[in-house]
Amino acid sequence: MKNTKELLPVLTAIYVINRTKEQTDEDIENILGYAFRRIFNSNTNLLLLASIGQSKETMMPQVKELLKKETKYLKYLEEIKK
């Protein structure tokens, strides 16, 4: 598997977006909870606290900053627009 170091920030972004007021899907939350606990040996408590009562619009600047620092996701978006 290539670029596995990007896996945690990508899953973090998905988790936070899913936990916003408009989005929460229990199946996605359970799968991500499993990944955090079993794959990364961590939990989602801090992510849960950070996303309580937040809208997607208020969380996206932080999510984009995380993805910009930890992944090549934004570069990927530019490439697929071409």
Image: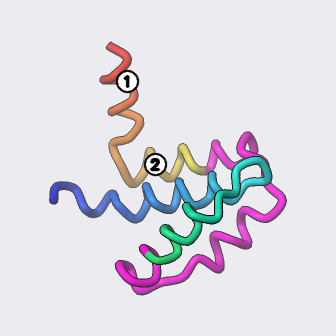
Q: Quadrant of residue 38?
A: bottom left
What amino acid type should be assigned to the residue bearing mark 1? Glu
Image quarter where the C terminus lies is: top left
Q: Is residue 17 left or right of residue 79?
A: right
Residue 44 pos. (x, y %): 58, 76
Any magenta on residue 36? Answer: yes
Q: Which residue shows up at 36% across the image and 49% down it?
A: 71
The residue that disc 1 covers is 78
Q: Residues within 10 Å of mark 1 (few under 14, many from 20)?
A: few
Instruction: Please tell me the numbered disc located at residue 25.
Output: none
Q: Which residue shows up at 55% across the image and 71% down it?
A: 30
What amino acid type should be assigned to the residue bearing mark 2? Leu
Residue 48 pos. (x, y %): 69, 71
Give the residues in magenta: 35-62
The residue that disc 2 covers is 67
Image quarter where the N terminus lies is: bottom left
